[in-house]
Each structure stands twice: as C-alpha cells, then as structure tokens.
Amino acid sequence: MIDLETSTPAALQAMHARGVRGIRLNLEVSGQRDHGFALKQLKRAEGLVGPLGWAVQVYADVDVIAELSVDIAALQVPVVLDHFAGIKAYKKEEQKAAFASVVELVRRGNAYVKLSAPYRASRNAPDFDDVAEFAMALIQARSDRLVWASDWPHTGSSASRTGNLDQVEPFRKTDAGRALNQLASWTTAPALLQGILVDNPARLYGFDRAAA
C-alpha cells in the first residue's frame, strides 16, 4: 500500500525496480463523492508517481468520474477507470449523461477503462449481459484505451460489510472463463481482442515482452 502523504521517492523507486507500474485510488468503497477531495487525491497521486511514468487507477462511481472528466483529461499521467468506469447497468437512464462524458474522456486518449468485474456493474447474473452496450460503446470509441482484468480474488461488496473484523467475508464464485468469452463476444475481430488483452496493457504498463 502506498501512502500519498508519506511514501518516499526511494521507496517508490524500489517498487519500480520490482515491476510496479501503477497505484489505485479507491473512492467507491468509502462512498467518497466530494469533487474537491477526489481531485486533491488525484493531484497528489500524479505528483507522486508521474516522474516514474506510472498509471493512476481510479475506482469511483461513474457520476464522480464524469464530474472529474476535465481534470482527468488534464493530468500528465495515464488514468485507468476501474470496473467499467463505475457504471451501474441497472441505473442506465440516470447515468446516461455521465457515461457519455466518460466515453468522450476515453476518446481524448488520456484515460483507459478496465473492463473488469461485470458483477459490480450489473445484477443480471450469471452473464451480466446488460453491460454489453457499455462495453461496445467504449470499444467503438477507443478500443486502444481498454484493458481487461479478472478482478481475482473476487471479493464481496462493501455494502455487505458490517465492520466486524471477526466476520469472514466469503469470496464470490466467479467463472473467469465465462467473463473472457463475454469479452470475446464484444469484439468483432481477433485484432481487437489481442489489443485489449495484450497490446494495450503492454503499452500502458511498459511490459517488456521480449524478456517474457
């Protein structure tokens, strides 16, 4: 874990040498929706990891992302919007304008979206098929700004947590193969799938494929 207040350049350089290429700001679990606070955290993250060329991943509700879209576009670090940029497919109509702002932000090129954990964006188990239109809109806008992740180990929802540290939270039973097949169904050509799974993350995180 990185502390935006106290982490030192030496500590970050040591992480960089071990292959770390990004940090994550989790605004969703705490229910943080204050624009000023979120922007302050983004600026701190940019100043901390920007010199290393790292990405800043943000997990927040799509409405928060939309409100921050102009600020995110101006950052000098790549920003990864976690879990379908925080959309909730069951709030499609009320989040339509916010999602349009996200698509425009991605189209500009500084922001990436991680197509991960459809169960956090949808209530339609097991296929979560109502996220398809959001994914396909993003693919059509900038397929080169999308990456995929399994969200392993599939933790539960913060809404179900009580704060009782003696209570063991069960992991979700999730089929990663089904999620990969779903991703493949959204792409119209093998090159698109190759881009999302391989080429885009390699570019974003600077993977050395020659050494792999």
Image (cartoon, rainbow, N blue to C red):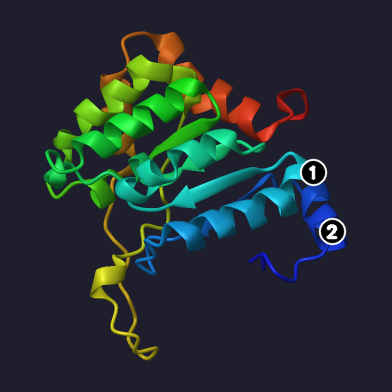
Q: Quadrant of the C terminus?
A: top right
* Percent position of residue 183, x then y: 32, 27
Q: Earlier in the sequence, mark 2 or mark 1?
A: 2
Q: Quadrant of residue 149?
A: top left
* Percent position of residue 138, x then y: 34, 24
User: In the rendering, which numbered label is found on residue 9?
Assistant: 2
Residues packed near mark 1 inside 10 Å, few (<14), some (14 to 19) or many (20 plus): few
Do we see residue 40 in this rendering?
yes
Q: Gap between marks 2 and 1, in whole Å?
A: 10 Å
Residues packed near mark 2 inside 10 Å, few (<14), some (14 to 19) or many (20 plus): few
Q: Amino acid at mark 1?
A: Pro
Front residue of 186 and 24: 24
Whether residues under marks 2 and 1 lie with C-beta atoms below 8 angstroms apart, the answer is: yes
The structure residue drawn at horizontal position 76% and vertical position 23%, both measured from the top left corner, is 210
Front residue of 201 and 29: 29
Q: Quadrant of the N terminus?
A: bottom right
Q: Amino acid at mark 2?
A: Pro
Front residue of 210 and 70: 70
* Percent position of residue 196, x then y: 46, 24
Q: Which residue is mark 1?
A: 51
Q: Quadrant of residue 163?
A: bottom left
Above or below, comparing residue 20 to residue 184 in the picture: below
The structure residue drawn at horizontal position 57% and vertical position 59%, both measured from the top left corner, is 41
Above or below, comparing residue 109 to residue 35 in the picture: above
Taking the image as shown, residue 69 lies to the left or right of residue 170, namely right
Q: Quadrant of residue 168?
A: bottom left
The structure residue drawn at horizontal position 79% and vertical position 57%, both measured from the top left corner, is 12
Q: Secondary structure at mark 1?
A: helix
Q: Secondary structure at mark 2?
A: helix
Above or below, comparing residue 85 to residue 15 in the picture: above
User: In the rendering, which numbered label is found on residue 68?
Assistant: none
* Percent position of residue 44, x then y: 66, 57
